[in-house]
Image (tube, rainbow, N blue to C red):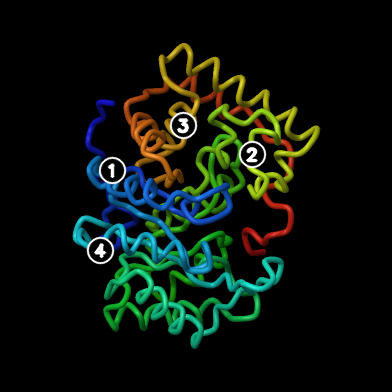
Amino acid sequence: MSVTTVPSVPLGTQGLAVSRLGLGCMGMSEFYGESDQAESVATIHRALELGVSFLDTADMYGYGANEELVGRAIADRRDQVVLATKFGNVRNPDDPRDRRIDGSPDYVRQACDASLRRLGVDHVDLYYQHRVDPRTPIEETVGAMAELVQAGKVRYLGLSEASAETIRRAHAVHPISALQTEYSIWTRDLEDEILPTLRELGIGLVPYSPLGRGFLTGGIRSLDDLDEDDFRRNNPRFQGENLRANIAIVERIDALAAEKGATAAQVALAWVLAQGDDVVPIPGTKRRSYLEQNVGALAVDLSEDELATLSGVAAQGERYPDMSSIDR
């Protein structure tokens, strides 16, 4: 497949530059069915060849295994990578249902050192708090993260699934470069308050699940299309009447994709990219073929009418069955 090298853009106003499209690595280790480490490493290498240098992982993915995988993949090419990871979601390996959020300063320091060891690097470029800890003032958490910047272990700071108020409080302690949160054609919660706050403060937006956890690609029409251990089987948007209603969204995207000579995934990604140069999506994949398809979205141009048509859809069902999302 012939694809254009992905350009670099600023993420926030603090000096961080990333590829216009990133790569979410979570599914390489967990949540989306069987893993293939060799193909995952090959996908990361192909991403770097295409200029997709912004790699996203977290310490909770695969209980640390995802950071180890990414670390192996970039061991001989660290200078080509803008590396992002996250802390704060603490999971019990003996009980997947047992998880907590920890933003205490001591844990911030411990988590960073553990991530650096697993990744095999001396610093990460972007360090996110994965979820906001309601028991720890954000000022204390970000204060500890700022110490990591001063120590050279972290270059830039980010938050994930934070409210506008929390973002403001955090940014007052140390500049925040990026907010990672779910954003796509069917997840638009942040547009009213959070996105304007980011733009006021000069913070970039990193949408995860820009393809609606794969649903907007058109490849999922029933639960039978998912592996038995795929977490989407328990996602409310993939259940019963919600699923049947949400298929209408995919049908609208499919129709437009056919007119454009593109895939549904490319149209869905093109919509996210069109929301602003300060919006850098990180579609996740563990296969080179899908990676290349995603990069092709950069060449899909949507008109104002087409963007409006896609913006008019609304998903049915909650984003998560039980996991905390944007802090209140």
Q: Does residue 284 lie above or below 104 as drawn?
A: above
- How packed mark 2 is, by other alpha carbons closer than 10 Å (few <14, some 14-19, many 20 or more), is some
| Amino acid type, mark 3 | Trp
Q: Please name the residue that numbered disc 3 is placed on.
A: 271
Looking at the image, is mark 1 or mark 2 earlier in the sequence?
A: 1
Q: Does residue 88 lie above or below 197 as drawn?
A: below
**Side of 318 where 241 appears, left or right:** right
Q: Please name the residue that numbered disc 2 is placed on.
A: 226
| Amino acid type, mark 1 | Arg
Distance CA(mark 3)–CA(mark 1): 24 Å
The local secondary structure at tag 2 comes to loop
Where's residue 192, x and y in %?
A: 58, 46
Viewer-proximal residue among 149 and 196: 149
Where's residue 130, x and y in %?
A: 52, 65
Distance CA(mark 4)–CA(mark 2): 33 Å
Q: Please name the residue that numbered disc 1 is placed on.
A: 46
Q: Does residue 30 lie above or below 240 as drawn?
A: below
The local secondary structure at tag 3 comes to helix
What residue lies at 73% left-to-right and 58% top-to-bottom?
A: 322
Looking at the image, is mark 2 or mark 3 earlier in the sequence?
A: 2
Looking at the image, is mark 4 or mark 2 earlier in the sequence?
A: 4
**Side of 13 where 185 appears, left or right:** right
Viewer-proximal residue among 9 and 93: 93
- How packed mark 3 is, by other alpha carbons closer than 10 Å (few <14, some 14-19, many 20 or more), is many
The local secondary structure at tag 1 comes to helix
Where's residue 172, x and y in %?
A: 44, 73
Q: Please name the residue that numbered disc 4 is placed on.
A: 75
